[in-house]
Image (cartoon, rainbow, N blue to C red):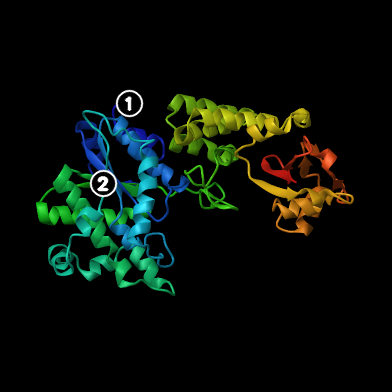
Amino acid sequence: MANLYDELQWRGMVYDATEGLADVLAKERVTGYIGFDPTAPSLHVGNLLVMMALARFQRFGHSPIAIAGGGTGMIGDPSGKTQERVLLSSEQIEENLAGIRQQLAKFLDFDRSDNAARIVNNAEWLAAFDLLGFLRDTGKHFTVNYMLQKEAVNRRLESEEGISYTEFSYLLLQARDFLELFDRYGCTLQLGGSDQWGNITAGIDLIRKLRGKKAHGLVMPLVTTASGAKFGKTEKGNVWLDPERTSPFRFYQFWLNTSDADVEKYLCYFTFMTRDQIAELARVTRDAPEKREAQRELAREVTALVHGRDHVARAEHASSVLFGEDIATLGADEVLAVFEDVPSTDLPADALADGGIGVVDLVARVQLAPSKGEARRLVQSGGIYVNNRRVSDPQARLVRDQAIGGRLFVLRRGARQLHLVKVTA
């Protein structure tokens, strides 16, 4: 398929776009950009849709630019936010930018001779402006009425907290980014989530007013689950791309747990699989949902993109051992090697003395359940396993002899939620 727009459209990745963009992408090589706010030292799965869009953009022969927002990150984007962000120091932002650059490099090719990707920091120009110069050169081209019409501003004005002048000015800064990239690199397209439409069209208007040229925008849908929940959130918070924040095993399990209602959509969004491949997996899901083939392919593909094929193999090996009845026959070192990425808790050996520790107490202690009452309910309903053996007696206790190699207990809640208990001297 030669047209990027058609590719994005069949994948469900076009929420809105400026008129004529489809023809431009079919006929011309375009330079386009997406901005990333350095609010943390890592991106998370909520950023993956736009990262994949930028990667597809390059694969279709266009030139991608990723803005690491060292300048706009000092202000904070009000889009999609109900309250003002905590402002970061310049040192925090620099630290965050380093992590983000490393993660983007897994999706973009910076060494191509014809359409190499670029990462730029908008602090390069935004930090150089003086207030009066910025108001004269940029601010005068936007009326307050125009800015008040933007959805992100409107939503915040209606909230109890309102919006500060600092965040109100964000739209002007992002518009200036688009103009600077237009001037420096011939960038004529900005991409982003649907909540960025107001900021993107402001940049398009600024280029038209100051340069007399036409620029374009394309926004993608905000990803939610079939139940309407925000995508990428778990009980433990964000699912990060940094393996130190979310282990590759947990990352793999996150995608493996995708519901049947969401898996086809996520295959379109987050993998490079073809239309025919995805259609076949969708058919298998309809005909034999218990096989979870689509979920397995999704977990493999996304984990490979973010962490590499080696971590896919390790996660799959851990999963196969996880559901095997023979786990207790493995040595402690083997279990530790397989479950290296699984969350763990140290348990002092003396906790197992004098009749051992109650299963209910241990489940609550490692937070597989939020309370002892909930842990008891889970045990009684058959939802708790120790070393892959179901425990249904809430009075059951564990002693050291039952630990694998006298050192480990593998706790499991339900089908997939794991926790490793390490017995310490």
On the image, numbered disc 1 is attached to which residue? 1
Quarter of the figure with residue 331: top right
- Residue at 82% from the left image edge and 42% from the top image edge: 400
Answer above or below: position of 284 versus 257. Answer: above
Q: Position of residue 103 (x, y in %)?
A: 40, 41
Name the residue type under label 1. Answer: Met
Mark 2 Cα shell of 10 Å, populated few (<14), some (14-19), many (≥20) = some
The residue sitting at 30% across, 55% down in the picture is: 70
Q: CA distance from mark 1 to mark 2?
A: 30 Å
Q: Secondary structure at mark 2?
A: strand
**What's the residue type where badge 2 is placed?**
Val
> Is residue 290 visible to us here?
no
Percent x, y for residue 350? 81, 51
Which residue bears the numbered disc 2?
120
Q: Is 221 situated left or right of 4 in this image?
A: right
Could you say which quadrant of the image residue 263 lies in? top right
Determine whether, in the image, residue 220 is placed left or right of residue 44.
left
Q: Which of disc 2 and disc 1 is earlier in sequence?
A: 1
Question: Residue 227: horizontal and vertical position, in percent?
Answer: 57, 50
Nearest the viewer among 266 and 234 is 234
| Left or right: where 81 falls relative to 191 | right
Work out whether residue 307 or residue 413 is closer to the camera in this orientation and state it: 307
Q: Nearer the viewer, mark 1 or mark 2?
A: 2
